[in-house]
Structure formats: C-alpha cells, structure tokens
Amino acid sequence: MLLIPAGQTDISRLKLLRDVTLNQLKSAVRGTTTTQPLIYRDLIQQDLLPNAAGGDLNTRFSNPNALVANVSGQLYSQTLQNFQSIGIYGYASLAASPLISLLQFNLGSAVTIAQFFLDTIYADQSEVVGYFDTPVIYTPQQTVNINAVASAAVGVGAESFVLLGMVYEPAGRTIQPQNVQ
C-alpha cells in the first residue's frame, strides 16, 4: 500500500477514493446479519469527527502513551458496534517536527492489514497530508487497532495528527442526530 502526498493527488482521484471508501463501508454494514431490524434510510455516512466513531476515535489524535524509538506503540483500540463500519483513507501531520514514521493498522492485536511509511510526505518539507492508495476498512464488530512507530522517543501527547476517513452507521448511534446534515 502506498501513501501519496497530497500535492501529487488531483481532486478527481480524491473524490474516487472517498466514493470507493463509502461503497465498501455500505457493503460491510448492509451485509451484517442480526435479529434487530435495520432500515437502510436510517444509515448515514459522515467524515470522522471528534466523538464520531467508536466513542473516542477522534480526527485529531495525539499519542496516548510514550513512544519508544523504533518500537511499535498503540495509539488506539476499539471494537466496532454492530452496523458500524469505518474507512480511513489519509493522514495529516499537525506536529511541527513529526517523529512518527510509520502507521500500522491492525485487525485485533495480531493481524496487520495495512501500514504506511510517513516519510513519503515528510521528505517534501511543504507536505503534511498524504492519501492512501487503498482505504483501510473496518467492518462491524471488528477490533480497530492502530499502532505507530516513531523515529525517536516521543512523550505522551507530544505528536498530533489527523486520520482522514468516514464512518457509516445508523443515525444517533455514535454520531449524535443534531450533527447529522
């Protein structure tokens, strides 16, 4: 999987990436079987926003634990609810001198489904945003586990960044109805 600097991505490619992500999220949720009734018109999609997906999966991240140089450390872990899917298609650094050099997306604690070396965007001093060539998709009831590797030690909360993505789920589940447009 590739991380493509924003300056090398045109708007049509970005729109296509968002469309592909949304279609995969819809398929994942609609394929869920349960005894609870599901009305598809009640399902909504929205960009990842603070307090939107998984309770505390916010768009603005900072490392919750200290990161040891060149050792994988956990940034986030949450099991998705039934009828909830998340797609992540990009990364933006908010740090003046970013130290996280790799993001690793795992299914549970053992299966790595994607990893992206962030030096691709750091190499160009004017870039802070990168898009994945393929979105990272988590489907209902899967455990989202995001890890990072830093090139040097990072203190708790010292590295801030944004994950670009969207959530697809029933309205009012974790996206409050007043936030739905």
Image (tube, rainbow, N blue to C red):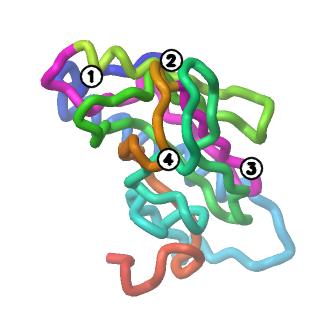
Mark earlier in primary sequence (1, 3): 1
Q: Is residue 141 magenta?
A: yes
Circle 1 residue: 5
Circle 4 residue: 156
Circle 2 residue: 1
Magenta stretch mostly in which secondary structure? strand
Question: Of the residues shown, which amino acid type is indicated by label 1?
Answer: Pro
In what quadrant of the picture does the C terminus appear? bottom left
For the residue pair 29 and 87, the one nearer the viewer reads as 87
Q: Which residues are magenta?
A: 124-149
Q: Is residue 48 left or right of residue 36?
A: left
Question: Of the residues shown, which amino acid type is indicated by label 3?
Answer: Gln
Report the mark closest to the observer, 1 or 4: 4
Q: Is residue 29 left or right of residue 172?
A: right
Where is residue 147, by image quadrant? top right
Q: CA distance from mark 1 to mark 3?
A: 29 Å
* Res. 32 visible in picture: yes
Secondary element under disc 2, as helix, strand or loop, is loop
The vertical placement of 96 against 150, above or below, is below
Q: CA distance from mark 2 to mark 4?
A: 28 Å
**Residue 64: horizontal and vertical position, in percent?**
54, 50
Mark earlier in primary sequence (4, 3): 3
Mark earlier in primary sequence (2, 4): 2
Numbered badge on residue 142: 3
Secondary element under disc 1, as helix, strand or loop, is strand
Question: Of the residues shown, which amino acid type is indicated by label 4?
Answer: Val
